[in-house]
Image: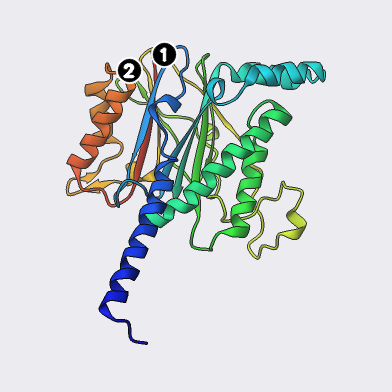
């Protein structure tokens, strides 16, 4: 079929408008500064470096329970229904914040579609979790995992790490195909080693369906099922300590002089550890680019004990 020059130009303009519209929608999901959790005793900041433009395969979702949800209304309702366990869980949510780091396989603009799907599904699921349990539980991630197994292509897995920090310096997280968080000790001036039994990890979302869901009998899987998710629980050590949540775009970054992580990153943190979380984040990202041109999206969230 022959397409004249005028028709080709019109089609190109139409496709360009579609891509611009998609980019506009994806950018609406990029977290704003006001969405970063505010927590007594902590300074938090994060962001993403997308190698293909303003959106890509990496995405951050912040959960400031106090600002995003009406916790008091839920506490009052659960109290009226005599669900004391739910009341206690909701009261604890008043003293913690959550961060979800999402990394879709690939870093093109269209890979942001899967990240956007997970963003919306996660936040919708969080509402039901708070209403039923008073907190976000592993059940949400079991259902998300099976949903993505059933709907995404075999070559499109989604890595995720979800962590919650509370004002008593407790940090709990679930990792599905993402690197473990890193803890930099201000006192010891280095990254601290964490015992392997505190570092449970699971396959990326969508790779294997979950066994611990009620619909497992309707979900065929030639490779079997994923075992039950478990939460890791850490305690941050002291004032000035820095916890980094990050995607593999940081840990696998390489240049002519070798790997960026952990030695080069550790040196940068020594130099900037006295700064605030936002300045620490900016210093890491500037140094990452100076070290070598990134070939993958990279996301970092800095959680610093004041």
Q: Are marks 1 and 2 in contact (CB under 8 Å)?
A: yes
Q: Secondary structure at mark 1?
A: loop
- What scheme was used to colour the molecule? rainbow
Residue 79 visible? The answer is yes
Residue 251 visible? The answer is no
Vertical position of residue 51 compared to residue 60: above or below: below
Q: Secondary structure at mark 2?
A: loop
- Quarter holding the N terminus is bottom left
* Residue 301 at x, y percent in the picture: 39, 31
* Residue 196 at x, y percent in the picture: 50, 35
* Residue 33 at x, y percent in the picture: 38, 27
> Residue at the spot x=50%, y=39% of the render?
161
* Residue 91 at x, y percent in the picture: 65, 16
Q: Earlier in the sequence, mark 1 or mark 2?
A: 2
Report which quarter residue 134 is drawn in.
top right
Crowding at dot 2, Cα within 10 Å, few <14 / some 14-19 / many 20+, comes out as many
> Residue at the spot x=22%, y=46% of the render?
258
> Residue at the spot x=65%, y=45% of the render?
142
Q: What label does residue 210 carry, if any?
A: none
Nearer-the-camera pick, 67 or 51:
67
> Residue at the spot x=45%, y=27% of the render?
35
Give the left or right position of residue 160, taking residue 43 as reference.
right
Q: Kindly identify which residue carries mark 1.
A: 238
Q: What label does residue 186 carry, if any?
A: 2
Nearer-the-camera pick, 28 or 131:
28
Report which quarter residue 136 is drawn in.
top right
Give the left or right position of residue 283, taking residue 231 as reference.
left
Give the left or right position of residue 25, taking residue 225 as reference.
left
């Amino acid at each position: 079929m022959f397409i004249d020059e005028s028709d080709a130009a019109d089609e190109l303009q139409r496709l360009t408008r579609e891509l611009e519209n998609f980019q506009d929608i994806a950018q609406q999901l990029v977290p704003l500064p006001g969405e970063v959790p505010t927590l007594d005793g902590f300074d938090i900041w994060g962001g993403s470096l997308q190698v293909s433009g303003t959106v890509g395969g990496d995405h951050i979702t912040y959960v400031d329970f106090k600002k995003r949800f009406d916790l008091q209304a839920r506490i009052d309702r659960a109290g009226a229904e005599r669900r004391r366990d739910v009341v206690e869980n909701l009261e604890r949510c008043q003293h913690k914040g959550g961060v979800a780091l999402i990394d879709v396989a690939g870093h093109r603009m269209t890979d942001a579609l899967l990240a956007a799907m997970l963003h919306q599904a996660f936040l919708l699921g969080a509402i039901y979790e708070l209403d039923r349990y008073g907190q976000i539980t592993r059940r949400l991630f079991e259902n998300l995992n099976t949903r993505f197994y059933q709907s995404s292509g075999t070559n499109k897995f989604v890595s995720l790490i979800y962590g919650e920090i509370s004002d008593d310096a407790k940090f709990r997280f679930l990792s599905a195909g993402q690197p473990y968080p890193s803890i930099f000790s201000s006192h010891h001036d280095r990254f601290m080693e964490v015992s392997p039994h505190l570092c449970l990890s699971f396959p990326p979302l969508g790779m294997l369906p979950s066994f611990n869901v009620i619909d497992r009998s309707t979900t065929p899987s030639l490779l079997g099922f994923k075992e039950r998710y478990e939460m890791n629980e850490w305690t941050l050590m002291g004032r000035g300590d820095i916890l980094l949540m990050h995607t593999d775009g940081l840990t696998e970054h390489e240049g002519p002089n070798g790997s960026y992580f952990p030695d080069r990153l550790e040196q940068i943190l020594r130099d900037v550890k006295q700064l605030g979380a936002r300045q620490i984040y900016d210093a890491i990202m500037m140094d990452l680019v100076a070290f070598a041109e990134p070939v993958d999206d990279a996301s970092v969230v800095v959680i610093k004990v004041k």
